[in-house]
Structure formats: structure tokens, C-alpha cells
Amino acid sequence: QSALTQPASVSGSPGQSITISCTGTSSDVGGYNYVSWYQQHPGKAPKLMIYDVSNRPSGVSNRFSGSKSGNTASLTISGLQAEDEADYYCSSYTSSSTLLFGGGTKLTVL
Amino acid sequence: QVQLQQWGAGLLKPSETLSLTCAVYGGSFSGYYWSWIRQPPGKGLEWIGEINHSGSTNYIPSLKSRVTISVDTSKNQFFLWVNSVTAADTAVYYCARASWGAADGAYHYYGMDVWGQGTTVTVSS
């Protein structure tokens, strides 16, 4: 299984919005609404930000939103803040009953 | 507040067996899937596998021949074994909790919402 495809890096200025894409296949992202997004700060464990494509766990800011079209899922962060600077990973359930992560995207807040 | 605490040997020689424990504190053990994920230095996350409270497992195909995940419900603990390790198994290993459920006429995957602190495992001769 190859990792889901994410851009290596994205950047934005405070207050702006950015979108991170996550492309898979019909056997994972396109086949199920079981896409999650995780935020990871350096040296820390990942934190769940989005589940089931577009749902936020309790306590996650509504500046974070998710969507999906075909084989590509997206994470949008609006009103960028300095603390949003981190690595972001998508993951998807697959037809093999496994989970697959994306390669990760480094978000830089300029 | 559910917490996961993990431990295990941090330095291994090639061909040895990696063994990690993850203990669940402050919450129910049943009704969830308990996962292991690893992250090589400077690289991304890789899901290794999962187990539920009744012992049903799923593993990533590329590691399935070398990996075993088991559970001890009496201690609220689950375990990871990886045999015949090489330098490529050097990584930070995380345990995490995941859940599935039915609601509103649909089946949902609620993601990995609780994570352990991570254990650094280095394989070197």
C-alpha cells in the first residue's frame, strides 16, 4: 500500500485560509467516508482534528474543516494562527481493513 | 480522562524482537480498537495494526509476517511485538485508541482520539 498523497508543504499568513489535499484511490479515500486528519507539533504525539471526512471532535476549533470529492480529501484551516504551524496527516480506512496515512504536510505560518 | 501510557526497550540489536506495552488508564477497554503507529526519524506516520478487546486483529500487509498485537483485558493493556528487527524499524512508536459506531443510520469511524506519549526504539549493532 502506498501512502496517500499530500503536498510536502503549504504556507500562509496569519488570518488567511489554507487547504491541504490528500489524494488516494477508490480503495481508500474514494471508497469510504472514513477520512481523518491529525495535527502533530514537533516532538509531540499526533492530535485528532477531523474524523469521518468533516466532523470535528469536541474541543477542536471550528477554524478546522474537512471535505471530500472523489478520491481527494481536503483539510481547510481558516483564520490561520501561529499555533497552527505543525505537520498535518490525513488517514483513510482501506478496502483491506487497514488504515493508511498520507505522507504529511508541513504548514508554515509566515 | 482516558490516558495511554506506553513503555518498552528502547535499544535493540538487529534480529532481536521489539516488545512494547500500552496501558489504558481512566476509561473502558472494551468497545474500542487499540492501535500501534510508528514514525521513523524525520518521516511520516505509518499505521502498524490494531486489536479490539476480544482479540480481533488487523495488520498492515507489509509487516504482517513479523508483527503480533495482543491484549490483556484483565490489566487493560495491549502489546506490540515485532520480530527480526532491522535498522528500518527504528522509529518512535505510538499506541492509540480508535472507535467505530453506528449513529443516525450510518456507520462512523471516530478516529484515533487518544494517543500514548511515544516510545523511541533504535535498532543498531
Image: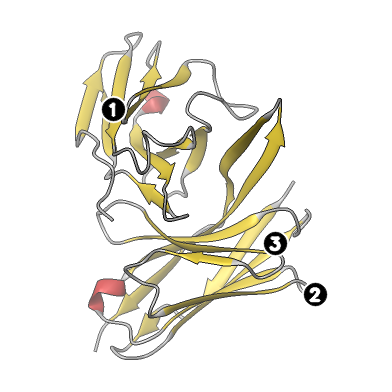
Quadrant in the picture for residue B21: bottom right
- Sort mark 2 into few (<14), some (14-19) or many (20+) by Cα contacts within 10 Å: few
Q: Residue at x 61, y 36 (%)?
A: B108
Whole-number angstrom distance, CA of label 3 to CA of label 1: 33 Å
Q: From the image, tell me which residue sits under label 2.
A: B74
Residue A108 at x, y percent in the picture: 26, 27
> Are discs 3 and 1 located on one and the same chain?
no
Q: Earlier in the sequence, mark 3 or mark 2?
A: 3
Horizontally, residue B7 falls left or right of residue A109, namely right
Q: Residue at x 29, y 41 (%)?
A: A104
Per the rendering, the mark at residue A21 is 1
Quadrant in the picture for residue B3: bottom right
Q: From the image, tell me which residue sits under label 3.
A: B24
Residue A37 at x, y percent in the picture: 44, 35
The image quadrant where one finds the C terminus of chain B is bottom left
Q: Label 2 is placed on what type of residue?
A: Ser
Whole-number angstrom distance, CA of label 2 to CA of label 1: 42 Å
Q: Nearer the viewer, residue A26 or A47?
A: A26
- Sort mark 3 into few (<14), some (14-19) or many (20+) by Cα contacts within 10 Å: many
Quadrant in the picture for residue B105: top right
